[in-house]
Image: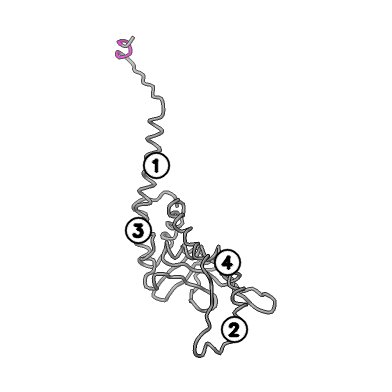
């Protein structure tokens, strides 16, 4: 969708309140075209430059077999930087991001690889989260080894805490201002020619 209007913004808000994130996701995708919003989201990539370390578990978890060297080496294969960046962007803008763990065979081991889905296909109902696929709706159960649900602001109505609600109106005003400015410049920079007919034309001669 490109022709956003105040009415469409209100519709996106209304549908999100009942768990349908289709329009809200479309809006987030449109927000990414704004240079300032894109710049703010790019700053999140700075997190990837921080030192990464893994700590051993406590209690029963301490007994589990664990090789830290493999964990360190496997992390970026499991969670590629580009996919993590997309997941963080969805979380910041929409308040929720979803990714699928696609398992691949590597040597003698199976490793999951993060694949981020477009969050506009997410739906929420009293039965929980689901995602629309070509085969229909599929239940999303975080922690089942198949799906990852990223809700940085908590799991209770996460879309209501996303930045899209605060940005949408000002982003639309900016679009209108740029459009109006362009039309004004087009009119002010051109040459205008006026002609008259009838008695006025004879008098001017």
The residues tagged by marks 1 and 3 sit, at their Cα atoms, a distance apart of 22 Å
Give SS at disc 3.
Answer: helix
Nearer-N-terminus badge (2/4): 2
Q: Which mark is residue 66?
A: 2
In the image: residue 11, left or right of residue 70: left
Q: Categorize mark 2 by other alpha carbons within 10 Å: few (<14), some (14-19), many (20+).
A: few
Q: Are marks 4 and 1 in contact (CB under 8 Å)?
A: no
**Residue lying at 36% horizontally and 67% vertically, measured from the top left:** 18
Instruction: Tell me residue 142's x, y (percent).
Output: 48, 76
Q: Name which quarter of the figure residue 31 lies in.
A: bottom left
The residues tagged by marks 3 and 2 sit, at their Cα atoms, a distance apart of 44 Å
Instruction: Tell me residue 204's x, y (percent).
Output: 32, 11
Q: Which residues are magenta?
A: 199-203
The residues tagged by marks 2 and 1 sit, at their Cα atoms, a distance apart of 58 Å
Nearer-N-terminus badge (3/2): 2
Nearer-N-terminus badge (2/1): 2
Residue beneath disc 3:
166
Q: Name which quarter of the figure residue 111 lies in.
A: bottom right
Q: Is residue 202 magenta?
A: yes
**Residue lying at 41% horizontally and 76% vertically, measured from the top left:** 127
Instruction: Tell me residue 202's x, y (percent).
Output: 32, 10
Residue beneath disc 1:
179
In the displayed orientation, state which residue is furthest to the top: 205
Nearer-N-terminus badge (4/3): 4
Give SS at disc 4.
Answer: loop
In the image: residue 76, left or right of residue 132: right
Q: Which mark is residue 80?
A: 4
Which of the two discs, 4 and 1, sits closer to the camera? 4
């Amino acid at each position: 969708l490109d022709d956003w209007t105040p009415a469409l913004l209100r519709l996106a808000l209304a549908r999100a309140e009942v768990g349908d994130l289709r329009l809200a996701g479309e809006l987030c995708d449109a927000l990414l075209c704004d240079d300032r919003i894109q710049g703010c989201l790019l700053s999140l990539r700075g997190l990837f430059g921080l030192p990464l370390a893994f700590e051993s578990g406590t209690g029963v978890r301490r007994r589990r077999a664990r090789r830290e060297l493999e964990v360190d080496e496997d992390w970026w294969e499991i969670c590629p930087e580009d996919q993590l960046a997309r997941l963080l962007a969805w979380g910041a803008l929409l308040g929720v991001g979803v990714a699928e763990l696609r398992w691949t065979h590597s040597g003698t081991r199976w490793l999951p690889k993060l694949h981020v889905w477009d969050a506009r296909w997410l739906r929420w109902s009293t039965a929980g989260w689901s995602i629309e696929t070509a085969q229909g709706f599929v239940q999303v159960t975080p922690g089942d080894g198949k799906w990852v649900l990223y809700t940085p602001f908590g799991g209770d109505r996460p879309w209501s805490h996303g930045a899209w609600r605060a940005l949408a109106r000002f982003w639309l005003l900016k679009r209108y201002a740029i459009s109006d400015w362009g039309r004004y410049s087009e009119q002010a920079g051109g040459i205008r020619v006026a002609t008259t007919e009838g008695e006025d034309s004879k008098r001017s001669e």
